Image (cartoon, helix red, strand yellow):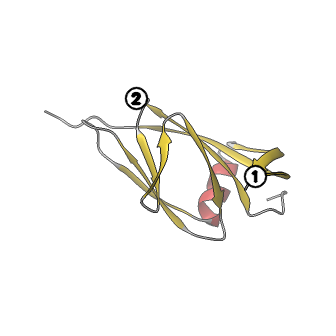
Amino acid sequence: MACTSSRGIIDLNTRPREAVVYLDGVKQGVTPVQFEYDFEVPARLEIVKDGYFNEDELLNQAWVIREIRKGNYTEGHYMIGQESTNSWMISTFRRMQKKEE
Protein backbone atom coordinates (compact mmCIF):
# COMPACT_ATOMS: atom_id res chain seq x y z
CA MET A 1 0.00 0.00 0.00
CA ALA A 2 1.24 3.43 -0.82
CA CYS A 3 -0.52 5.11 2.11
CA THR A 4 1.14 4.60 5.49
CA SER A 5 -2.01 5.06 7.60
CA SER A 6 -3.71 1.89 8.82
CA ARG A 7 -6.94 3.83 9.39
CA GLY A 8 -9.25 4.57 6.50
CA ILE A 9 -12.83 4.56 5.26
CA ILE A 10 -14.88 1.65 3.91
CA ASP A 11 -17.56 2.81 1.45
CA LEU A 12 -19.93 -0.16 1.08
CA ASN A 13 -22.82 -0.55 -1.35
CA THR A 14 -25.08 -3.55 -1.82
CA ARG A 15 -27.67 -4.79 -4.25
CA PRO A 16 -30.33 -4.63 -3.04
CA ARG A 17 -29.80 -1.46 -1.04
CA GLU A 18 -30.74 -0.89 2.58
CA ALA A 19 -28.90 -3.89 4.02
CA VAL A 20 -27.78 -3.47 7.63
CA VAL A 21 -23.99 -3.45 8.15
CA TYR A 22 -22.33 -4.57 11.39
CA LEU A 23 -18.64 -4.39 12.31
CA ASP A 24 -17.85 -6.73 15.22
CA GLY A 25 -21.55 -6.71 16.09
CA VAL A 26 -21.84 -2.90 16.17
CA LYS A 27 -24.28 -1.44 13.66
CA GLN A 28 -22.55 0.89 11.19
CA GLY A 29 -25.70 1.84 9.27
CA VAL A 30 -27.62 0.72 6.19
CA THR A 31 -26.25 0.59 2.68
CA PRO A 32 -25.00 2.64 1.10
CA VAL A 33 -22.83 3.30 4.15
CA GLN A 34 -19.36 4.61 5.04
CA PHE A 35 -17.49 3.76 8.22
CA GLU A 36 -13.98 4.01 9.63
CA TYR A 37 -11.74 0.95 9.75
CA ASP A 38 -8.23 0.24 11.07
CA PHE A 39 -6.71 -2.77 9.27
CA GLU A 40 -4.33 -3.41 12.18
CA VAL A 41 -7.39 -4.60 14.15
CA PRO A 42 -9.10 -7.55 12.40
CA ALA A 43 -12.90 -7.18 12.49
CA ARG A 44 -15.90 -9.25 11.45
CA LEU A 45 -18.06 -7.56 8.78
CA GLU A 46 -21.65 -8.78 8.56
CA ILE A 47 -24.24 -7.59 6.02
CA VAL A 48 -27.86 -8.51 6.78
CA LYS A 49 -31.14 -8.07 4.86
CA ASP A 50 -34.42 -9.89 5.35
CA GLY A 51 -35.06 -12.44 2.60
CA TYR A 52 -31.33 -12.62 1.67
CA PHE A 53 -28.40 -14.72 2.83
CA ASN A 54 -26.13 -12.89 5.27
CA GLU A 55 -22.69 -11.87 4.04
CA ASP A 56 -19.88 -12.48 6.53
CA GLU A 57 -16.25 -11.44 5.98
CA LEU A 58 -13.12 -10.96 8.05
CA LEU A 59 -11.66 -7.49 7.52
CA ASN A 60 -7.90 -7.32 7.97
CA GLN A 61 -4.82 -6.16 6.08
CA ALA A 62 -5.13 -9.05 3.57
CA TRP A 63 -8.74 -8.00 2.85
CA VAL A 64 -7.59 -4.42 2.17
CA ILE A 65 -4.83 -5.70 -0.16
CA ARG A 66 -7.38 -7.82 -2.11
CA GLU A 67 -9.61 -4.76 -2.52
CA ILE A 68 -6.62 -2.72 -3.74
CA ARG A 69 -5.91 -5.39 -6.38
CA LYS A 70 -9.55 -5.16 -7.51
CA GLY A 71 -9.06 -1.42 -8.08
CA ASN A 72 -11.33 -0.38 -5.19
CA TYR A 73 -8.71 1.79 -3.39
CA THR A 74 -8.35 5.58 -3.39
CA GLU A 75 -5.91 7.75 -1.44
CA GLY A 76 -6.93 11.20 -0.30
CA HIS A 77 -7.73 13.52 2.56
CA TYR A 78 -10.50 12.12 4.79
CA MET A 79 -12.06 12.78 8.19
CA ILE A 80 -10.87 9.94 10.44
CA GLY A 81 -11.63 10.05 14.17
CA GLN A 82 -12.86 13.65 13.87
CA GLU A 83 -9.61 14.88 12.35
CA SER A 84 -8.68 15.53 8.73
CA THR A 85 -5.86 13.26 7.66
CA ASN A 86 -4.17 11.82 4.58
CA SER A 87 -5.55 8.32 4.36
CA TRP A 88 -7.43 5.89 2.06
CA MET A 89 -10.89 4.73 1.07
CA ILE A 90 -12.04 1.31 -0.11
CA SER A 91 -15.20 1.56 -2.25
CA THR A 92 -16.67 -1.91 -2.53
CA PHE A 93 -19.90 -3.58 -3.62
CA ARG A 94 -21.65 -6.76 -2.55
CA ARG A 95 -24.51 -8.43 -4.46
CA MET A 96 -26.62 -10.29 -1.94
CA GLN A 97 -28.19 -13.63 -2.81
CA LYS A 98 -31.94 -13.99 -2.35
CA LYS A 99 -33.20 -16.90 -0.25
CA GLU A 100 -35.59 -19.31 -1.97
CA GLU A 101 -39.10 -19.12 -0.54
25 and 42: which one is in front?
A: 25
User: Residue 25 at what x, y percent from top left?
Assistant: 42, 60
The answer to the question of whether label 2 and label 1 lie on touching residues, with beta carbons closer than 8 A, is no
Residue at the spot 49% in from the left edge and 35% down from the top edge:
31
Q: Quadrant of the N terminus?
A: bottom right
Identity of the residue furthest to the left in this view: 101
Q: Amino acid at mark 2?
A: Pro
Residue 52 occupies quadrant: top left
The circle on residue 55 is none
Residue at the spot 62% in from the left edge and 55% down from the top edge:
66
User: Residue 95 at what x, y percent from top left?
Assistant: 43, 36
Q: Quadrant of the C terminus?
A: top left
Q: Amino acid at mark 1?
A: Gln
99 and 37: which one is in front?
A: 37
Up-down relation of residue 33 to residue 4 (above or below): above
Residue that label 1 marks: 82
Residue that label 2 marks: 16
Up-down relation of residue 39 to residue 94 (above or below): below
Please tell me whether mark 2 sits on a helix, a strand or a loop.
loop
